[in-house]
Image: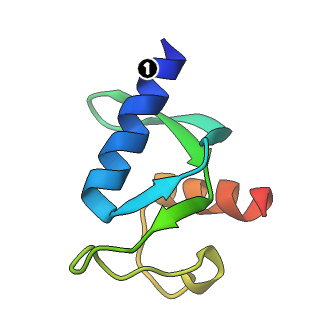
Amino acid sequence: DAAVTSTALLGWFRSRFGLALNNPTPIADFTHQTTHRMIRFVVLHATVKSGRLKPNTGIWRRPNQLDNLPMSNPQRKVIEGLQNAE
């Protein structure tokens, strides 16, 4: 059920990062074939509703600040989906 999955995702994100999100909406959906498996990616977009980012949760950047980072093709597709949603 999508509502259960969304609730679980929002809870995980709040517990991991300390941020409450507005309802995430799908903006891209694609598959990626590796040598041994097919992986389905569903890219969600959400805005922060409340909270403070917990310490030690990585380095956060805006999608337009990622050009100089090494990334796999699926990661680039995710960034492209985010940039198209803005």
The residue nearer to you, when weighing 57 against 68, is 57
Q: Quadrant of the C terminus?
A: bottom right
Q: 79 or 54: nearer the eye?
A: 54
Horizontal side of 49 relative to 12 (left or right) equals right
Residue at 24 percent across and 80 percent down: it is 55
- Please indicate, yes or no, whether residue 76 appears anywhere in the rendered image: no
Establish if 55 lies above or below 49: below
Left or right? Give the position of 60 relative to 45. left
Task: Residue at the far left: name it.
Answer: 56
Q: Amino acid at mark 1?
A: Val
Give the percent coordinates (x, y) of residue 12: 31, 44
Residue in view at x 60 percent, y 42 percent: 24
Residue 18 appears in the rendering: yes
Q: Nearer the viewer, residue 46 or 34?
A: 46
Name the residue carrying label 1. 4
| Picture quadrant of residue 58 | bottom left
Q: Position of residue 78 (x, y in %)?
A: 57, 54
Identified at 26% across, 29% down, the residue is: 36
Q: Residues within 10 Å of mark 1 (few under 14, many from 20)?
A: few
- Please, is residue 22 above or below residue 71 in the view? above
Q: Where is residue 69, by image quadrant? A: bottom left
SS of the residue under disc 1: helix
Q: Residue at x 46, y 55 (%)?
A: 20
Above or below, comparing residue 49 to residue 60 in the picture: above
> Residue 65, position in %: x, y?
58, 85
How many marks are shown on the rendered structure? 1
Left or right relative to 32: residue 44:
right
Residue 46, percent across and down? 61, 52
In which quadrant of the rendered view does residue 43 lie?
Answer: top right
**Image vertical order of residue 67 relative to residue 2, above or below:** below
